[in-house]
Amino acid sequence: MADEDPRDVDPPRLLDDRPGESRGAIQGILDALASSPEATEYYAAERERAFNRPNTITLMPEYGAEVPLWPQADETEALVSDSLRSKLEAWQATFDSHFRWDSGWDSEEAKAAWAGDARGLEAELRSEVAGIVEVNVDLWPLNPGYLHTGQPELPPRV
């Protein structure tokens, strides 16, 4: 009806009738979920995780970190697969073994290998969290004299 005023039409409701679905069927699904403690717990936990999930995560090594993802939190680590987590832990361990706060990298080979691994890890991380969170990358150990806190510009990406 072309002459119908859109303000006279009721807005859609959660339990609107749809072709092939009855209000009773949808309500039945909602009742079944509400009567299942496991489902209720699951959806409550999922809701809580969604609210606590960071909007942005940063891939960045740091002294004493187990996993180089920031913010350091279970919610951040839960965003990645166990396989990627293992790779990130190994990359962090390489940083811990070969980079010293007072003198930098112990060899150019270690620095180059670590930087090369960073490229693959960044790509894999971005792939796994695409559509969920944004990814920042801070590879401050590749820039001599760069302090990643309190300095206005980010280091060049490798």
Image (cartoon, grey):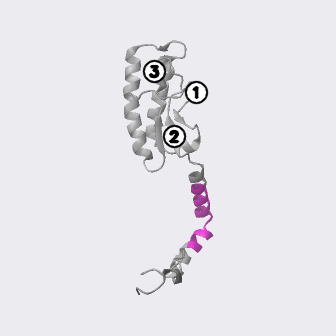
Residue at 57% x, 72% y: name it. Answer: 30
The tag on residue 57 is 2
Label 3 to label 2: alpha-carbon separation: 21 Å
Rendering coords of residue 118 (x, y %): 41, 30
Label 1 to label 3: alpha-carbon separation: 15 Å
Residue at 51% x, 12% y: name it. Answer: 103
Front tag of 3 and 2: 3
Q: Main secondary structure of the magenta part?
A: helix
Depth order, front residue of 36/44:
44
Q: Which residue position holds label 1?
A: 150
Provide the secondary structure element on which disc 2 rests: strand
If you read the primary sequence from the N terminus, does the residue marked by circle 1 or circle 3 appear first?
3
Q: Is residue 43 left or right of residue 155?
A: right
Contact, CB < 8 Å: mark 1 with mark 3?
no
Q: Is residue 35 left or right of residue 106?
A: right
If you read the primary sequence from the N terminus, does the residue marked by circle 3 or circle 2 appear first?
2
Q: Is residue 103 left or right of residue 40?
A: left
Rendering coords of residue 38 (x, y %): 60, 62
Label 2 to label 1: alpha-carbon separation: 19 Å
Residue at 39% x, 25% y: name it. Answer: 115
Instruction: Give the residue type that dot 1 points to.
Output: Gly
User: Is 13 a magenta residue?
Assistant: no
Number of residues whose C-alpha sits closer than 10 Å to that of mark 3, classed few (under 14), some (14–19) or many (20 or more): some
Rendering coords of residue 143 (x, y %): 45, 21
Residue at 37% x, 22% y: name it. Answer: 113
Depth order, front residue of 89/60:
60
Q: Which residue position holds label 3?
A: 143
Which residues are the magenta region?
Answer: 30-47
Number of residues whose C-alpha sits closer than 10 Å to that of mark 1, classed few (under 14), some (14–19) or many (20 or more): few
